[in-house]
Image: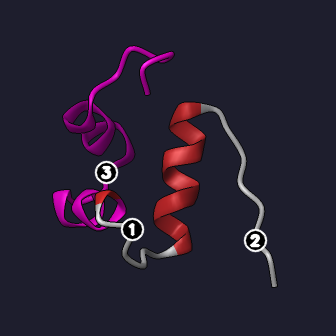
């Protein structure tokens, strides 16, 4: 987020995720994959799911 010069509030607005979802991420709690995809799309990054 620092590299993209975006704060948490702006990320929530651009991704249309809730502040609850952001709080869960901050506490390392489970979030939906859909939420991670939205964040990665805005930040132009990828993630790998390990099974």
Residue 51 vs 33, above or below: the answer is: below
Toward the right, the furthest residue is 51
The residue singled out by tag 2 in the image is 49
Quadrant location of the C terminus in the rendered image: bottom right
The Cα–Cα distance between marks 3 and 2, rounded to whole angstroms, is: 22 Å
- Give the crowd class for mark 3: few <14, some 14-19, many >=20 residues within 10 Å: few
**Dot 3 lies on which element?**
loop
| Residues marked 3 and 2 touching at CB (< 8 Å) | no
In the rendering, at what x and y percent does residue 5 appear? Answer: 38, 14
In the rendering, at what x and y percent does residue 28 appear? Answer: 39, 68
- Give the crowd class for mark 1: few <14, some 14-19, many >=20 residues within 10 Å: few
In the rendering, at what x and y percent does residue 36 appear? Answer: 53, 59
Quadrant location of the N terminus in the rendered image: top left
- Give the crowd class for mark 2: few <14, some 14-19, many >=20 residues within 10 Å: few
Mark number displayed over residue 28: 1
The residue singled out by tag 3 in the image is 16
């Amino acid at each position: 987020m620092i590299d993209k010069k975006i704060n948490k509030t702006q990320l929530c607005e651009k991704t249309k995720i809730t502040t609850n979802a952001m709080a869960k991420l901050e506490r390392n709690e489970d979030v939906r994959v859909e939420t991670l995809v939205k964040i990665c799309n805005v930040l132009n990054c990828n993630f790998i799911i390990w099974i």
